[in-house]
Amino acid sequence: MPNRMENHKQIPKILVIVPAYNEAEGIAQVIRRLQEDTPYADVLVINDGSSDATGRIARAAGANVIDLTCNLGIGGAVQTGYRYAADHHYDYAVQIDGDGQHNPCDLSRLLSAMSDTGADMVIGSRFITKQGFQSTFARKMGIGLLSTLLSKLTGRTVTDPTSGYRLCGRRAISLFAREYPADYPEVEALMLLYNRELSFTEIPVVMNERQGGVSSISALKSVYYMSKVILSVLLMKTMKRKAWENLYES
């Protein structure tokens, strides 16, 4: 475990970023589990302009909280967390959803995988061993399409591109603090890493069903989401190709 001093090595600083929008129903339980399973990490809740008591409940549960004055969406909320991590010189930052889907006890495995592989990001994938909550059939079809597309574009195996359970090291923290996709950014963030020649890998995790609140992606939004993300990653791939062509020509 990288949370204890061994052979007089400096203890790494680890930040848990919890983006939360109207998660009053379950945020206290998420924080309690983080405190129990990851006592070596600091917990930062990004209260993304919630209209309920998410921020107040998170503070009462013992988390640090940044209250955004308006709803920026998941991209803006997560980037706020990465900016905080960069400004406060954290060695690692991990995203964990505020709805209880992610198991904090898996963080130690993500940290071990990053240490073993040297990857800039480690993603917790629910589809490697196919245990636990697997999402709805329609969403799995969409995720499968995105997985195939990203795997072909990056040359790396991607099984769960929409997973919000991801650990970043210092290079990825620095990148995401400067630039991070908006709207539904998980897929585009992987292309951003690829374009900047940073690495990522996946390990299997077991996820739970949402413990409270309502998903921000409705059936109608899912169609928009798929169209937007596919177009965006294709454009990002084209931009990388043109950048290499310009470098070669110069």
Image: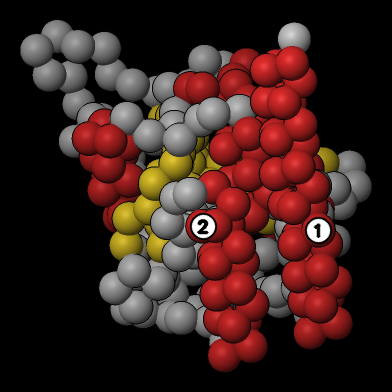
Furthest residue toward right: 70
Q: Which residue is mark 1?
A: 231
Nearer to us in this view, 1 or 65:
1
* Amino acid type assigned to the residue bearing label 1 in the image: Leu
User: In the shown orientation, is residue 95 left or right of residue 126?
Assistant: right
Q: Position of residue 130 (x, y in %)?
A: 34, 78
Furthest residue toward bottom: 137
Whole-number angstrom distance, CA of label 2 to CA of label 1: 15 Å
Q: Residue at x 28, y 35 (%)?
A: 117
Nearer to us in this view, 124 or 232:
232
Judge whether 60 appears above or below 212 on screen: above
Judge whether 246 appears above or below 39 on screen: above
Q: Is residue 102 visible?
A: no
Q: Residue at x 59, y 83 (%)?
A: 141
How many neighbours does mark 2 have within 10 angstroms: few (below 14), some (14-19), or many (20 or more)? some
Quadrant in the picture for the C terminus = top right
Q: Secondary structure at mark 1?
A: helix
Q: Position of residue 125 (x, y in %)?
A: 41, 62
Q: Secondary structure at mark 2?
A: helix
User: In the shown orientation, is residue 69 left or right of residue 225?
Assistant: right
Residue 211 in which image quadrant? bottom right
Q: Which residue is mark 2?
A: 151
Furthest residue toward front: 249
Q: Position of residue 13 (x, y in %)?
A: 40, 23
How many neighbours does mark 1 have within 10 angstroms: few (below 14), some (14-19), or many (20 or more)? few
* Amino acid type assigned to the residue bearing label 2 in the image: Ser
Q: Position of residue 27 (x, y in %)?
A: 58, 60
User: In the shown orientation, is residue 211 left or right of residue 233?
Assistant: left
Quadrant in the picture for the N terminus = top left
Q: Earlier in the sequence, mark 2 or mark 1?
A: 2
Q: Residue at x 46, y 81 (%)?
A: 134
User: In the shown orientation, is residue 59 left or right of residue 67?
Assistant: left
